[in-house]
Image (tube, rainbow, N blue to C red):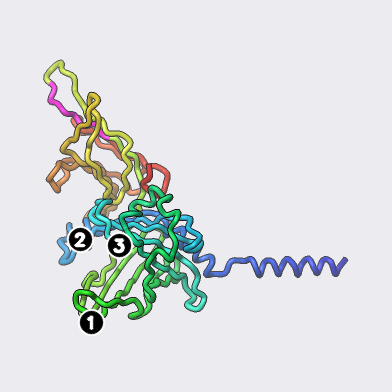
Amino acid sequence: MRFFAALCLFSLCFLQNNFAQSPLEADLKQMTAMFAGEFDNFQQVWKEREDKAPEVHEHIHSIFFPIKQPAFGENVFYVKQYMDGNPQKIYRQRVYSFSINKQEQAIQLDIYSFPVDSLYYDSHLNPSKLAALMPSMMTMTQGCAVYWKREGEAFVGYMKDKACNFVSKRSGKKIFITDSLRLTRDEIWIRDEAFDEDGKYVFGNKAKIHHKLKRCRFFKAWMAVRTNEPKEGEKEQYVSIRNVILHDQGGRFQCVGEQDGKTVATKYWAELSQVVYQTGLPVMKFAIYEEGNSKAVAYSWTNPEARQIGINMRSLQGSATFREGMFGIP
């Protein structure tokens, strides 16, 4: 009986030792969960413009959408990155694969480029576009892996020194690329830089300040815009805009809707954003802009964690309500 009990205890210990997660496996699970989502540096750009900074960062938006592509590994993402708040202004589209590198004692990110970008646009909205994709169909530049390590509650990413490089077709010189990243639950910081073999700057922020992207929360919005100036006794007429999905890091839409069975485009745009005023007060702002005017004609504001915000100018009214879900998919 004692032998049987000892055998059971030994078996239990053996199973625990062999099936318990290693620290790197736990880090990989946590990091990929934190990585999924959409991020935007609207706040950073807005503040730099307000402060008249000598160099204003590009306004970029990143989508990191988890996908099931076993040929690339177990932790795979479709990546779309665009500029200036315009989803059509894509500057990078990739497949990312995360795995454990025991020798480096880090999480390794391998980056795959598409053979023809346009065939795979917006695959987060239609993942079936990726169904037949295989690593052999894509380009992965050797030496350009990114390594991630835990730093407290954050993960820090880096490339090995001068490992990622290519020869410029324009200059004939070797170009070295480096990457510095930081991921937390609410932000991802990205600093891509490139220098040629003579040490001359090719691209990147010259002050070595990261693009600081904040995680997006998504809202469902509606607007109603009056289209007439009614005289006494006349009925007000409105264009109705319904079920618009936008995020709180500078998401915006034109007030285009239905009136009497026709599509009507108004001169107004609505924008939802998180900003920090010079007093240090962080707020969520719902603003209305006129076409061609960079200053809001009106806005309302509330605390950054609010789940609903509205505005009423009588001739123009609407609200935005928080919706569950990590991505802006209707």
Q: Which residues are magenta?
A: 223-230
Q: Is 329 on the left or on the right of 253, as rendered?
A: right
Looking at the rendered structure, the kind of residue marked 3 is Lys
Q: Which residue is mark 3?
A: 212
In the depicted structure, whether residue 104 falls above or below residue 21: below
Q: Which residue is mark 2?
A: 48
Q: Earlier in the sequence, mark 3 or mark 2?
A: 2
On whether residue 143 falls in the magenta region, the answer is no
On whether residue 224 falls in the magenta region, the answer is yes
Q: Earlier in the sequence, mark 1 or mark 3?
A: 1
In the depicted structure, whether residue 174 falls above or below residue 61: below
The secondary element bearing badge 1 is classed as loop
Q: Residues within 10 Å of mark 1 (few under 14, many from 20)?
A: few
Residue 32, x across and y down, in percent: 46, 61
Q: Earlier in the sequence, mark 2 or mark 1?
A: 2
In the depicted structure, whether residue 27 falls above or below residue 285: below
Q: Considering depth in this image, is 226 or 81 the residue closer to the camera?
A: 81
Q: Which residue is mark 1?
A: 199
Quarter of the image containing the N terminus? bottom right
Q: Residue at x 31, y 44 (%)?
A: 246
The secondary element bearing badge 2 is classed as helix
Residue 288, x across and y down, in percent: 20, 41
Looking at the rendered structure, the kind of residue marked 1 is Gly
Q: Residue at x 54, y 69 (%)?
A: 23
The secondary element bearing badge 3 is classed as strand
Q: Considering depth in this image, is 18 or 113 the residue closer to the camera?
A: 113
Q: Is 180 on the left or on the right of 207, as rendered?
A: right
**Mark 1–mark 3 distance (CA, rounded to whole Å):** 26 Å
